Amino acid sequence: MSPTEVKVGDRITFPFGKGEKEGVVERVFQKNIYLRVDFPRHPGKLVRRKIDDLEPKGKTKKKR
């Protein structure tokens, strides 16, 4: 996933705790993404994640 693939308003799922959450993309930067997520006691919370953390495990780049 790269910043050019994600657009504001897209719905994406991301790992959160032991499960997954779904959120709406609010802002996209080069390495970070801001998601609007509804939690039971805090609807509309803004959560920041690194774009690298949202990629599937198999697509990560190997370090040399």
Image (tube, helix red, strand yellow):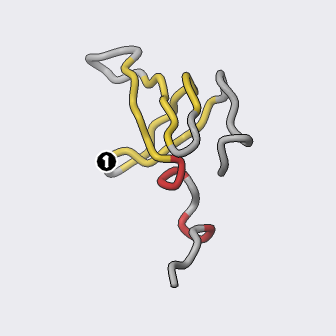
Q: Nearer the viewer, residue 4 or 56?
A: 4
Looking at the picture, does residue 28 appear above or below residue 38? below
Kindly identify the residue that appears in the image at 51 percent across and 79 percent down.
63
**Among the 4 quarters of the image, the one containing residue 10:** top right
- Residue flagged by tag 1: what amino acid is it? Gly
Residue 21 is situated, as x and y percent measured from the top left of the image, at 45, 37
Kindly identify the residue that appears in the image at 40 percent across and 23 percent down.
46
**Among the 4 quarters of the image, the one containing residue 56:** bottom right
Neighbour class for label 1 at 10 Å: few (<14), some, many (≥20)? few
Mark 1 sits on what residue?
Answer: 17
- Local SS, label 1: loop
Horizontal arrangement in the rendering, residue 34 relative to residue 59 (left or right): left
Q: Residue furthest bottom?
A: 64
Q: Residue furthest right?
A: 5
Residue 1 is situated, as x and y percent measured from the top left of the image, at 65, 51
**Among the 4 quarters of the image, the one containing residue 11:** top right
Q: Nearer the viewer, residue 15 or 55?
A: 55
Q: Residue furthest left?
A: 41
Looking at the picture, does residue 14 appear above or below residue 48? below
Horizontal arrangement in the rendering, residue 2 relative to residue 25 (left or right): right
Kindly identify the residue that appears in the image at 43 percent across and 48 percent down.
15
Kindly identify the residue that appears in the image at 62 percent across and 67 percent down.
59
Residue 27 is situated, as x and y percent measured from the top left of the image, at 55, 25
Looking at the picture, does residue 64 appear above or below residue 15? below
Horizontal arrangement in the rendering, residue 37 relative to residue 4 (left or right): left
